C-alpha cells in the first residue's frame, strides 16, 4: 500500500504565523474605517420613538384577547345551560286522550211556595229604599217609608200610616210593632222596629211554623225600619214577632194574640226587648 508523504512542517508553521499576525497596514485601515463611520454618524439625527403606534398595537392586542375570552365564556355558559335543561327536563310521556264525560243537565229551576223556617242564624233580607219608594209585598199590598214613619196600602185601596216621631214609641231602646191586613188570597204582616242599629232579622211565628220577614230601611241608618211578610191564605191564629241581631240575640219580641179570620186591619201594638 502506498502512503502520502508527510507534509512539510515548515510550510504549516508559516501559514499559522501568517493567519495570526496583523500587519501595521491592516491596523491603520481599521482605524480609518472607525473614524469614517463616526464622522458619518454625527450628521444623522435619530427620529422620534413611535410610542403612539406601540400603544395602539397594545390596545388592539388587549381587545382581541378580551373578545376571545368573552366568546369562550359564552360558549361555555351555553353548553352548561343545554346540559342543565337536558338533565332537569323530564321526559314527556305520550298523552292519552280520555273521552269527555258530559255533566248531567241541571234540574229545571222552580219557584217553591213559601215554607216555614225555624232556623235562627240567617239574617232577614234587608233593602235600603228611597223615601216614598213603593215596594209591592203581595198582590194589592204596597209598603213605603218616609222620614216620619211607615205607610202601607191594601187591595181595597185604603192607606195606613205608623209614625215613629209622634212619641207613641220609645226609640231609646229596641222595640217592634205588628200590623195585620187580610185579603181572600193573602195575610199581610208588617210593622216597624226601632231603638237599634243592630237589627238583622224579624221572625213571625204561628201555629203553622216560623217565617222570616223582609226588612226595609232608609239610607243613613236612621235607627229604625219596617218589616213585612205576605203569607198565602187567611191567618187563623195570632202570630208572635221577634227581633234579632246578627249574633242571634233577641232584641225585642211581641207575643201573638188570640184572634181568628180578621176582616179588617188589626194591630197588636209594640213591644220592647
Image (spheres, grey):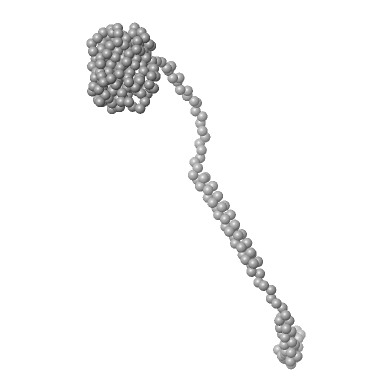
Query: Residue at the spot x=49%, y=44% of the render?
Result: 88
Expressed as whole percent of the image width and height from the top left, the position of residue 30 reads: 73, 86
Up the image or down, 54 lies above or below 202; here it is below
Q: Quadrant of residue 58?
A: bottom right
Q: Position of residue 52 (x, y in %)?
A: 64, 67
Judge from the rendering whether residue 166 lies leftward or rightward of residue 7; answer left or right: left
Question: Where, quadrant-wise, is the C terminus in this rendering?
Answer: top left
**Against 125, is 82 above or below?**
below
Q: Quadrant of residue 225?
A: top left
Query: Would you say residue 232 is visible in this rendering?
Result: no
User: Is 260 situated above or below 33?
Assistant: above
Quadrant of image for the N terminus: bottom right
Spot occupied by residue 207 in the image (x, y as percentages of width and height): 26, 13
Residue in the picture at 25% in, 16% down: 269
Nearest to the observer: residue 142 or residue 257: 142
Residue 47 in percent (x, y) is at 69, 73
Quadrant in the picture for residue 265: top left
Q: Is residue 88 visible?
A: yes
Camera-nearest residue between 225 and 240:
225
Report the label total: 0
Residue 70 lies left or right of residue 158; in this view the side is right
Q: Residue at x 76, y 86 (%)?
A: 4
**Nearer-the-camera pick, 127 or 147:** 147
Amino acid at each position: 500500500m502506498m502512503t502520502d508523504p508527510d507534509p512539510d512542517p515548515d510550510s504549516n508553521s508559516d501559514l499559522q504565523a501568517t493567519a495570526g499576525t496583523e500587519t501595521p497596514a491592516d491596523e491603520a485601515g481599521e482605524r480609518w474605517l472607525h473614524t469614517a463611520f463616526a464622522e458619518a454618524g454625527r450628521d444623522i439625527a435619530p427620529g422620534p420613538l413611535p410610542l403612539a403606534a406601540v400603544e395602539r398595537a397594545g390596545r388592539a392586542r388587549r381587545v382581541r384577547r378580551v373578545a376571545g375570552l368573552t366568546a369562550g365564556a359564552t360558549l361555555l355558559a351555553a353548553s352548561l345551560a343545554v346540559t342543565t335543561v337536558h338533565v332537569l327536563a323530564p321526559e314527556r310521556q305520550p298523552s292519552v286522550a280520555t273521552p269527555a264525560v258530559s255533566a248531567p243537565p241541571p234540574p229545571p229551576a222552580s219557584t217553591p211556595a213559601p215554607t216555614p223556617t225555624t232556623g235562627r242564624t240567617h239574617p232577614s233580607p234587608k233593602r235600603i229604599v228611597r223615601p216614598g219608594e213603593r215596594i209591592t209585598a203581595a198582590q194589592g199590598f204596597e209598603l213605603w217609608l218616609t222620614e216620619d214613619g211607615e205607610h202601607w196600602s191594601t187591595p181595597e185601596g185604603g192607606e195606613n200610616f205608623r209614625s215613629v216621631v209622634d212619641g207613641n214609641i220609645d226609640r231609646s231602646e229596641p222595640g217592634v210593632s205588628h200590623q195585620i191586613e187580610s185579603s181572600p188570597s193573602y195575610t199581610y204582616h208588617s210593622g216597624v222596629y226601632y231603638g237599634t242599629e243592630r237589627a238583622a232579622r224579624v221572625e213571625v211565628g204561628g201555629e203553622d211554623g216560623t217565617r222570616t220577614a223582609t226588612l226595609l230601611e232608609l239610607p243613613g241608618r236612621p235607627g229604625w225600619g219596617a218589616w213585612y211578610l205576605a203569607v198565602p191564605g187567611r191567618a187563623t191564629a195570632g202570630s208572635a214577632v221577634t227581633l234579632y241581631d246578627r249574633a242571634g240575640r233577641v232584641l225585642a219580641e211581641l207575643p201573638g194574640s188570640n184572634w181568628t179570620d180578621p176582616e179588617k186591619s188589626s194591630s197588636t201594638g209594640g213591644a220592647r226587648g
